[in-house]
Amino acid sequence: MLTLAVETSCDETALAVYDSEKGPLGEILLSQARVHSPYGGVVPELSAREHTRNILPLLDRLLRDTSLDLRRIDFVSFTLTPGLILSLVVGVSFAKAVAYLLKKPLVPVHHLEGHIYSVFLERPVDYPFLALIVSGGHTDLFLVEDFSRYTFLGGTLDDAAGESFDKVARILGLGYPGGPEIDRLARRGRPVYRLPRPMIDDGSLNFSFSGLKTAVASLVTERTDLRAEDVARSFQDAVVDVLVEKTVRAVKETGVKRVAVVGGVSANSGLREAFRERSVKEGFEVFIPHPRLSTDNALMIAYAGAERFKRGVTAPLDINPEPNTPLQEFCKVWS
Ligand code: KG4
Ligand code: ZN
């Protein structure tokens, strides 16, 4: 079965064609980072305008690159939720138009489910497993017992991990998105500044990153002799420590010894290394997708869409995007 997948939940316009038997046939992705960088974050109106401008030419290019006749696809998968509503509207309307013209079914996908299944594009993970989703909008721990069977174990009470990278990057005068910039700087830095590890030992599986960002802001205003690379490294180490520690706690509490680490922040080199080391020490398996699949992409939406389609799920043509539907709610409706 062939699917065309559409992802426009934030600032990447992404399309992919995926064959559920053979795997990926092609994908295309256009980042809007350059458009938003002067503003230090995503500007929703600009994001929607860029998606509108680019999505059709991108489809054209994808079809040319793959020599695919669009009429061959069996269904259209698309990100329904969560995301910036104006950006989602573009992708959802586009998916609906393609489905209507081709008279093919529509399959809604939850963006976080896409992230969870990004690891399956490389190799399947046995159930049950834990998923740490670390992105610009989410920091969540889920127990995954099967496709569409997710139990929420904990999440952030304030900023998401990626959001804290982006905010600290802004404090340091770096570009957007801040995560890759901090990652690059931190490689040359030393962890010399003592920064808090919020909630690390509180016994819960929740997170909090806003105090850490405030601590960096105070450090930067109080001291004039700082080396940006050392601040980046000290901050990154603090985030990594908390993410790894909470995940180890989840492994111990659930007894589940397989962990998928997904979402944009899982591209972070410090986080990847820390998980590799700690997983060996604690005796669990860790699955982290290639950095290209960690950040937003349409292949992960295609994979999750194909799994949902296999289970007979399709959506009507009057479906509307939803800005923030929790994963479990989505699964209740679309099962
Ligand atoms: O999953 P994603 O592409 O989009 C959302 O669903 O939010 O994640 C984007 C987030 C941004 O906050 C970005 O700064 C962060 O992922 N990110 C990173 C790295 N690459 C992207 N954070 C830390 N280190 C990286 N290498
Ligand atoms: Zn994402």
Image (spheres, rainbow, N blue to C red):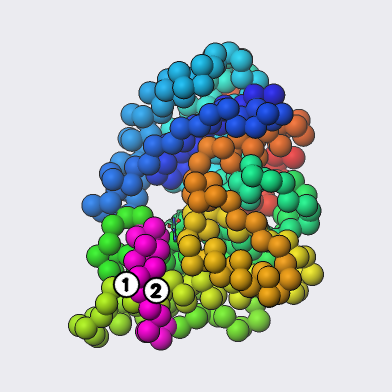
> Is 189 colored magenta in this rendering?
yes
Residue 202 location, quadrant = bottom right
Q: Position of residue 317 (x, y in %)?
A: 59, 25
Q: Is residue 217 above or below residue 327?
A: below
C-alpha span from label 2 to label 1: 6 Å
Q: Which mark is residue 233?
A: 2
Q: Quadrant of the N terminus?
A: top right
Magenta region, residue range: 178-195
Q: Element at badge 1?
A: helix
Query: Going by the image, does 230 lie left or right of 206?
Result: left
Q: Is residue 242 above or below residue 137?
A: below
Q: Residue at x 46, y 75 (%)?
A: 237
Q: Position of residue 85 (x, y in %)?
A: 45, 43
Q: Residue at x 63, y 49 (%)?
A: 119
Q: Residue at x 75, y 32 (%)?
A: 310
Is there a contact, CB below 8 Å, between mark 2 and mark 1? yes
Q: Position of residue 36 (x, y in %)?
A: 29, 48
Mark 1 burial class by Cα count in 10 Å: few <14, some 14-19, many 20+: many
Ligand 1 near label 2 (Cβ, under 8 Å)? no
> Which residue matches tag 1?
229
Query: Going by the image, does 10 lie left or right of 130?
Result: left
Q: Residue at x 45, y 83 (%)?
A: 196
Q: Position of residue 203 (x, y in %)?
A: 66, 81
Residue 130 location, quadrant = bottom right
Q: Element at badge 2?
A: helix
Q: Which mark is residue 332?
A: none
Q: Amino acid at mark 2?
A: Arg
